[in-house]
Image: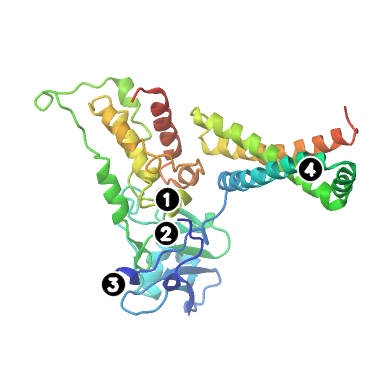
Amino acid sequence: MVQINLPKNSKVQKGNYFKDKTGSKNLRKVNVYRWDPSTGENPRIDTYEVDMDNCPSKVLDVLNKIKNEIDPSIAYRRSCAHGVCGSCAMNMGGKNGLACTTPHSEIDGDIDIYPLPHLKVKKDLIGDLDGLYKQYQSIEPWLKSNSNSETTEIIQSKKDREKLDGAYECIMCACCSTSCPSYWWNGDKYLGPAVLLQAYRWIVDSRDEEREARLKKVADELKLYRCHTILNCTSACPKGLNPAKAIAEIKKMLATANI
Amino acid sequence: MENKEPLSPHIQIYRWHISSLVSISHRITGIINIIAITIICFWASSLLLGENNYEAINSFLNSFIGKFIILGITWSFLFQILSEIRHLIMDLGYGFEIQTTKITGLIVIFGSIIFTVIFYLIGKNFIL
């Protein structure tokens, strides 16, 4: 169901203001979404004044600086800091991305940081991705081959291998799925761009023998065809992949195949 | 415990870009067009009621509001057609690169406005 407004317990309130204590002249305001599960209060936006003269270039650096120097209570996921693990996916300046690869200089005005959109919030910037992982599991993202290949090598030509380029690089950070309005309104049934890109990755893998069954499985009004090429996913992907095109390719395969 | 967890903000905070704007406009113009076609059908069948009726509707359509509505519907139809062509090309698997989607989106937005002006000028016998 399309629900434009947030539920009552999710309405965002004005939070605390942390004034700069370093006396720096190069300050930027950073607005961060906060929610503490231990209190019964609504989420709030805390504002931090951050000294940009002593801050490295990425949004994750800003968050680390806040956590280390201003407010240690702030919670967010992070791990590799090099755009490989996909932990620090969040919404910055109104667009999803990885905090560790998004330069704060690309954001105009105050730096607004929210969790990934339309997720249940666990704490502060940490969203609940359980639903997405369950959907990922549902497409059975592993190689399925019924022949005697368990003991022998399955040869793949260079050309067949090239088909996986642009699909296997996905790090499942969920930036694309949580940017998609269709996924916001129908996330319980629609698989979303991230999972469909992975479904595509296994459908086009020449070594996989369950291609038809996989196609049949996603050929569903709600699972697949809720994609209306809004293209938020492709513009959000921090790895420069194209989930929208992968979904279009699946639709094309279904339109031309006899299933 | 389950229900206590808030929902993170979505459409309230997500920045619009050309493709999402064209997509939502495509839906809105689609609804407008259905209503417009229905009204046009009623208008056509109301011609059976005679000349007085025709004159009354005609004078309304020639008023400022009437002209505004006609131009609005013209734009709405043109936007829908251009956007639909964009969708057809995408269904064939082309035009998914970010730069291309921006360009085709802009073509839809400005193309619909330009064609509306051209239609208006043709209707006024200024050109052709």
Per the image, the residue denoted by label 2 is A118
Per the image, the residue denoted by label 1 is A183
Amino acid type at circle 1 is Tyr
Residue closer to the observer: A173 or B52: B52
Report if the CB atoms under discs 1 and 3 are less than 8 Å apart: no
Q: Nearer the viewer, mark 4 or mark 1?
A: 4
Q: Name the chain letter of the residue that bears numbered label 2.
A: A
Question: How far is disc 3 from disc 2 in space, using C-alphas?
Answer: 18 Å
How would you rate the neighbour count of disc 1 (Cα within 10 Å): few for under 14, some for 14-19, many for 20 or more? Answer: many
Q: Is residue A96 left or right of residue A25?
A: left
Q: Is residue A5 left or right of residue B30?
A: left
For label 2, the SS is: loop
Residue A187 at x, y percent in the picture: 38, 52
Residues beneath discs 4 and 1 located on the same chain? no
How would you rate the neighbour count of disc 2 (Cα within 10 Å): few for under 14, some for 14-19, many for 20 or more? Answer: many
Q: Residue furthest left?
A: A151
Amino acid type at circle 4 is Ser
Residue B109 at x, y percent in the picture: 67, 41
Per the image, the residue denoted by label 3 is B1
Residue A80 visible to the viewer: no
Question: How far is disc 1 from disc 3 in space, using C-alphas?
Answer: 24 Å
Q: Quadrant of the C terminus of chain B?
A: top right
Q: Name the chain letter of the residue that bears numbered label 1.
A: A
Amino acid type at circle 3 is Met
Question: How far is disc 4 from disc 1 in space, using C-alphas?
Answer: 44 Å
Q: Is residue B7 left or right of residue A136?
A: right
